[in-house]
Image (tube, grey):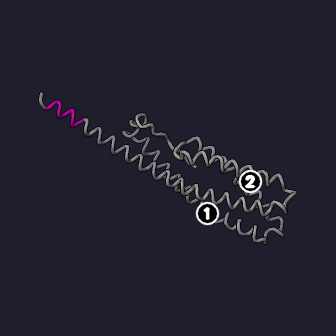
């Protein structure tokens, strides 16, 4: 009889320390996810600046291509708005899905604008056009790497949240699955 309370206390201590370890592991992975989002967000902001410079440089010379420029600006605004929402909570799945769609729209609008710039030979050699274009090429490479890092961090976090027995704690600590890009 006397061993029964000690056994229960020992069992409760084991469960408590397991919960603490599982919580700390998930929170560590969430921290890595947030850090990788911050790196990706910095690239998104740099790309937004380069696109803004490119649009400002080509807008006067490409008055006939106004719909393409307006589509580019609208896509840029959608990405900025979606990124702002993700910035508040980068571990939530739905805002990341909206950002992924906005990124796709931006990529299409940017490809169209860049092809129109290529058609205007007088613009191709303008320093105000070539520098943002170079920046966009460099940022595209950085974007791929940082996006992959973010997706890897999100997958590691999601894996930890869905693994047994950690998934037993999902409701207790309100862990949610993270989205990917």
Q: Which residue is drawn at 69% across and 62% down?
A: 50
Instruction: Return the residue found at the far right.
Output: 64
Task: Find out whether the residues at labels 1 and 2 contact each other: C-beta distance under 8 Å.
Answer: no
Pointer 1: what residue?
141
Residue 135 picture location, percent across and down: 67, 66
Residue numbers of the magenta segment? 3-11
Query: Is-magenta flag for residue 10?
Result: yes
Mark 1 vs 2, N-terminal side: 2
Pointer 2: what residue?
109
Q: Tag 2, which secondary structure?
A: helix
Residue 161 picture location, percent across and down: 43, 42
Indicate left or right for 163 with 122 as reference. left
Instruction: Return the residue found at the far top.
Output: 1
Q: Tell me: residue 143, above or below residue 181.
A: below
Looking at the rendering, in which quadrant would you find the N terminus? top left
Q: Tag 1, which secondary structure?
A: helix
Q: Name the one closer to the observer, 43 or 168.
A: 43
Residue 124 picture location, percent across and down: 79, 69
Dot 2: within a 10 Å radius of its alpha carbon, few (fewer than 14), some, or many (20 or more) residues? many
Indicate left or right for 178 with 118 as reference. left
């Amino acid at each position: 009889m006397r061993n029964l309370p000690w056994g229960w206390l020992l069992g409760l201590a084991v469960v408590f320390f397991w919960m603490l370890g599982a919580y700390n592991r998930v929170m560590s992975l969430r921290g890595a996810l947030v850090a990788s989002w911050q790196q990706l967000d910095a690239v998104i902001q740099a790309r937004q600046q380069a696109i803004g410079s490119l649009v400002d440089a080509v807008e006067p010379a490409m008055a006939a291509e106004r719909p393409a420029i307006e589509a580019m600006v609208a896509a840029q605004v959608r990405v900025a708005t979606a990124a702002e929402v993700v910035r508040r909570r980068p571990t939530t799945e739905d805002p990341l899905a909206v950002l992924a769609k906005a990124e796709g729209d931006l990529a299409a609008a940017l490809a169209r604008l860049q092809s129109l710039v290529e058609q205007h030979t007088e613009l191709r050699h303008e320093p105000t056009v070539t520098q943002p274009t170079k920046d966009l090429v460099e940022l595209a490479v950085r974007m791929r790497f940082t996006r992959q890092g973010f997706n890897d961090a999100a997958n590691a976090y999601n894996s930890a949240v869905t693994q047994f027995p950690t998934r037993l704690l999902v409701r207790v600590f309100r862990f949610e699955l993270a989205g990917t890009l």
